Image (cartoon, rainbow, N blue to C red):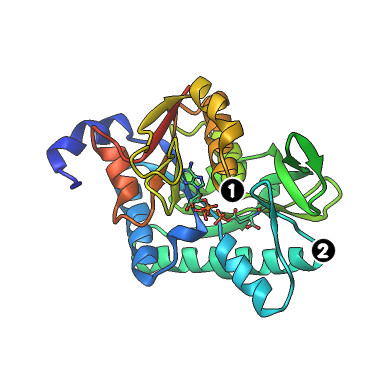
Amino acid sequence: MTLSFLEAVPFLAEFAGATIVVKYGGHAMTSPELRSGFAADMVALHRAGLRPVVVHGGGPQISAMLDRVGIASEFTGGLRVTSPEAMEIVRMVLIGQVGSDVVAEINKQGGPTAVGLSGADGGLLTAVRRPAYVDGLPVDIGQVGDAGAVDPSIVTTLLDAGHIPVISTVAPDADGSPHNLNADTAAAAVAIALGARKLIVLTDVAGLYADWPDTDSLISRLSAEELAKLLPDLSAGMVPKMEACLRAVQGGVPAAHVVDGRVPHSTLLEIFTHDGFGTMVTP
Ligand SMILES: Nc1ncnc2c1ncn2[C@@H]1O[C@H](COP(=O)(O)OP(=O)(O)O)[C@@H](O)[C@H]1O
Ligand SMILES: CC(=O)N[C@@H](CCC(=O)OP(=O)(O)O)C(=O)O
């Protein structure tokens, strides 16, 4: 797929001034080319008059660091079981490493500057501890939270000042204790609170497959109702991702997309082409 200026013109008008929340998954940032390409796309969106907000993940990067320091880690229902020791690593990797790398990469482009924040900054996110669900039953997975209250005013302030906000999904609960939020879940909550026009989730597959791993079964478009029916049969990383898309469109975001972040300019292709890219979920 290619980007054509003539094809893009109507979309430039349609999305002028629109807030777009882009969830940048840990699997879509695994090479220097992917990281600089992503940063260039965020700057391009900003220069085109949109208001991009980045919510980043870092699951593989957290797993690598937990491995290095010898802390065992496992996922239940697509969520990391997070002990107090693991929480320290999650915080260090998401805020100190991945988030600050994304900010630096955007700033290297020499355009609008990025500003990194975590859930604590400006009271952006308050976590509510949550279990995972296995066969419909709740299982305690430690310091893992859902996005409870969201106060997007610090993000709006940064957008109004011409910055690209970059959000790391670590947030305190009501008592101030840090929690690990799945980045897809947090991105949906932020998109709803900001009244975003789109949530775009970048990952390492072409989109949602009806019959994973059959690559002929890519779904290009589905409604919230159709997605709700599919959800119980989904596995692994796709569960929080598709739950997030469902939550976003049910919360007033007009469209949520899962796109392949390994493809150069996938975000721009999604926004500025007729056919779009990946899987689109609509209300
Ligand atoms: N139905 C499905 N369609 C697409 N991918 C799926 C599906 N079921 C499971 N997956 C897996 O989910 C992965 C994406 O989730 P995850 O690894 O958490 O990515 P990220 O780090 O980008 O959040 C894909 O690489 C794929 O292996
Ligand atoms: C609770 C939970 O699972 N948190 C995630 C947070 C990072 C994340 O979501 O990263 P990706 O988007 O790259 O998967 C984790 O610890 O891996």
Q: Nearer the viewer, residue 207 or 111?
A: 207
Q: Nearer the viewer, residue 248 or 112?
A: 248
Q: Residues within 10 Å of mark 2 (few under 14, many from 20)?
A: few
Q: Residue at x 80, y 48 (%)?
A: 173
Q: Is mark 1 within 8 Å of ligand 1?
A: yes
Residue 68 position by quadrant = bottom right
Q: What x and y, as percent, mark residue 134?
A: 73, 41
Q: Is residue 150 left or right of residue 103?
A: right
Q: Residue at x 38, y 29 (%)?
A: 221
Q: Is residue 267 visible?
A: yes
Q: Which residue is mark 2?
A: 84
**Vertically, is 182 above or below 251?**
below
Q: Residue at x 80, y 61 (%)?
A: 83
Badge 1 amino acid:
Ala
Q: What x and y, as percent, mark residue 96?
A: 61, 69
Residue 200 position by quadrant = top left
Q: What x and y, as percent, mark residue 78?
A: 64, 48
Mark number displayed over residue 220: none
Which mark lies nearer to you, 1 or 2? 1
Residue reaching furthest to the right: 175
Mark 2 falls on what kind of element? helix
Q: Is residue 105 left or right of residue 154?
A: left
Q: Is residue 117 left or right of residue 138?
A: left
Q: Earlier in the sequence, mark 1 or mark 2?
A: 2
**Vertically, is 273 above or below 23?**
above
Mark 1 falls on what kind of element? loop
Badge 2 amino acid:
Pro
Q: Which residue is mark 1?
A: 236
Q: Residue at x 70, y 79 (%)?
A: 69
The residues tagged by marks 1 and 2 sit, at their Cα atoms, a distance apart of 23 Å
Q: What x and y, as percent, mark residue 236?
A: 59, 48
Q: Nearer the viewer, residue 222 or 35?
A: 222
